[in-house]
Amino acid sequence: MSRNVRWLLPVAALIVVGVSACGTHSPPAGAGKAASINMSLTTVPTIRSVTVSPGKAVFGRCSGGSAGLNTASTPSKLGYPNGQCWLGKPEPGGSFPITITNTGIASDVYVSGSNAAPSDDGDEWDLCNAGLHPVVTCTGARRSEPGTNQYRILNFSPDNKTYRFGLSDDPACDRQFSESGGCFATEGQFQTEGIELIGPASSSDTSTAWTVTITWMPVPS
Amino acid sequence: MHLRLWAIGAAGLLAVLAIPAAAQASVGVGIQAGPVRLGGAAHPGGSYALPPVYVVNTGTQDESLSVRVERLSGGQGRGVPASWVRAGAAVSLSHSQSARIPLELVVPASARPGEYVSDVVVRGSAAVTDGSTNFGVAAATKLQFRIAPGIVAAPWFSLPGWVLLGVGVVLLLALLAGLARRSGLRISIDRELAGPGPLRAGRGNDVS
């Protein structure tokens, strides 16, 4: 073997020793055999969730509108201008057909509404609200009545009076969940509610079937 | 006649049984309470896979669940524009079914460094009926990440495995070639022409 190649031998030996040593860590002399036990652990669920019952409903007990213009409300149909319909009834003698249950961990419960969509996919009604800083200002009388192509949704419960500012499409604390003005709900806490709808002064869309969506949402408090 | 009476009675009984079931129909949705967090810092111009978010249908009806980013809860930090987070497609889930929806954070090059806070919101929607009030459900969990200054630093280990393997092989071959040259090892290859006679084309393998 050439002298030039000879220096490679210790390098090769080192590599062989290094590779063979990998993963062959032997236990020290006298060590006992390892033993282990399996243990199980159960934790509480960490889900933030809400359930609303029923999934849908139809407004009734409608009133208002103009009899002279033949646009007065009928018990099941909203009239113009600014007819009112109800889902449930405030106290006294109230009924509250919607049940919102916090089925997850303690959270704040927010509520929001949507624009009203006509069955012909035409002009929607914007959801307007009152108060000092409304998300969408009502353009009707005293800035609290809906104007053309606007409507309002107000929610109420047995524990609290009707929330007169009304819902907006911006999720906000559902004040019906707490008498102190908050909306904190613990697991299993539920609230029954009803809804009042005030229709527009007039509508540019001639549809007679409209769909609105009201959404409840638990958020980190 | 008796059969007709039985049929009417059975239909009436079914209707009576169906009323409570319909009355108890509910819509519901849930989301993981733990916040969605990016492991390390993000950099302007980078794209990152966020941990997929767990969602569940807690109602009794089939629902379509979709995810988007919306600032709802409090907390210090900049808001996250909804366009920065790409969520996976909506999923249809029946009662008690759950899914994990992938999320991708795409940070524009103009993003300012700092802490960012928002909420991942899952919305459940059942079939919408014309002329009615539909009750919707949603649930939110926090989204948190940090943007560090500087352009995207692509760590070497983020390269695809086949690229790393190729680089390793090339380096190993170069090392072996260098060692061979240094040791004076020479390998020459002679080619013998096929023919009738034992004519040699060269000196043959030569190891010195």
Image: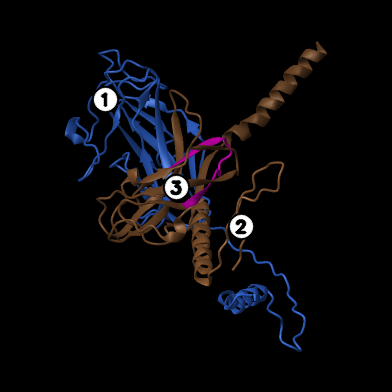
Chain colours: A blue, B brown
Instruction: Tell me if A172 is positioned left or right of B170 in this view.
Output: left
Q: Find residue A14 and name its label.
A: none
N-term-proximal mark, 3 vs 2: 3
| Whether residue A196 is visible | yes
Say which of B22 and A89 sits in front. B22
**Residue B68 appears in view:** no
Q: Amino acid at mark 3?
A: Leu
> Which region is colored magenta?
B51-67
Q: Identify which residue, A42 or A156, lies in the foreground.
A: A42
- Which residue lies under the disc numbered 3? B103
Residue farthest top in this picture: B1
| Closer to the eye: label 3 or 1 | 3
| Residue of label 1 | A149
Determine whether, in the image, residue A35 is placed left or right of residue A138.
right
Badge 1 sits on which subunit? A
Between the residue at mark 3 and the residue at mark 2, the CA separation in whole angstroms equals 67 Å
Residue B115 appears at what percent x and percent y? 31, 60
| Above/below status of B64 relative to A183 | above
Q: Are marks 2 and 1 on the same chain?
A: no
The chain that hosts pointer 3 is B
Dot 2, crowdedness within 10 Å: few (<14), some or many (≥20)?
few
The residue located at (57%, 36%) in the rendering is: B61
Q: Secondary structure at mark 1?
A: loop
Q: Secondary structure at mark 3?
A: strand
Number of numbered discs visible in the structure rendering: 3
- Label 3 to label 1: alpha-carbon separation: 37 Å
Which one is in front, B19 or A65? B19
Q: Which residue is mark 2?
A: B203
- Check if mark 3's residue and mark 1's residue have beta carbons within 8 Å: no
Chain assignment, label 2: B
Question: Magenta stretch: residue B177 in it?
Answer: no
Q: Identify the amino acid type marked 2.
A: Arg
